[in-house]
Image: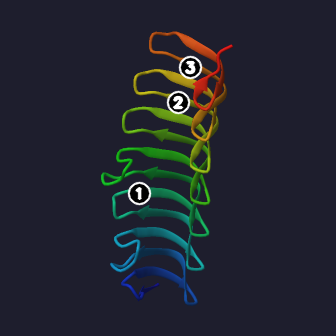
Amino acid sequence: MGTHTYEGGGTYVGEWNGNKMHGQGTYTFGPSSIFAGDKYVGEFKGDKKDGQGTYTFANGDKYVGEYKDDKMHGQGTYTYGPNSEWAGEKYVGEFKDGDFNGQGTYTFANGAKYVGEWKDDKMHGQGTYTYANGEKYVGELKDSKRHGQGTYTYADGDKYVGEWKDDKPISD
């Protein structure tokens, strides 16, 4: 166990292996860092976030989950804070190299929700998007747009079942 203060004011309190952060620890970014006010509490391996951890951003965003090689990777929850552009929104699911990737659920501030596949931070693959007004799309998505086979159910119960391209139904 030990404490180290870095140039720029960042501090690490935790376990070490040689001269590298390794094991459980807390890293608080200093005032001259581009990440000023951010804090990570969790596992380190060779000076990198690796394993379970919680990263709290200065704007109030928070990630709780797995890290690999300094990136969000594996299962986790990302909650957007009050000062974020996406305040009140939340993603629970799989991450790969810092991006939403794999199965996940995204809840929007307006009450809409998407449950399904993600690729590179975009809804991509099979999924269900439930709109705040109760309408629902079940089907294929590509780059966060309805694309491929899908069913859209309107609030009044009417349905469109068929092909979609670039977020629009393709009519015969």
Q: Secondary structure at mark 1?
A: strand
Are dots 2 and 1 in contact, CB under 8 Å? no
Identify the amino acid type marked 3.
Answer: Tyr
Is residue 14 left or right of 49 when viewed as pictured?
A: left
Label 3 vs label 2: CA separation? Answer: 9 Å
Check disc 1: other Cα within 10 Å, few if <14, some if 14-19, many if 20+: many
The residue labelled by disc 3 is 152
Question: Residue 129, which numbered label?
Answer: 2
Marks 3 and 1, how far apart at CA: 33 Å
Pinpoint residue 52: horizontal percent, then vertical percent.
53, 63
Q: Is residue 54 above or below residue 87?
A: below
What residue is disc 1 on?
62
Which residue: 52% across, 57% down?
65
- Compare marks 3 and 2 and give the one earlier in the sequence: 2
Question: In this picture, is 34 found above or below 52?
Answer: below
Number of the front mark, 3 or 2: 3
Left or right: 145 in relation to 156: right
Residue in the foreground of this view, choosing between 166 and 151: 166
Sooner in the amino-acid sequence: mark 3 or mark 1? 1
Picture quadrant where residue 74 is located = bottom right
Question: What is the image's colouring?
Answer: rainbow
Q: Nearer the viewer, residue 128 or 67?
A: 128
**First in residue order: circle 2 vs circle 1:** 1
Give amino acid for label 1.
Answer: Lys
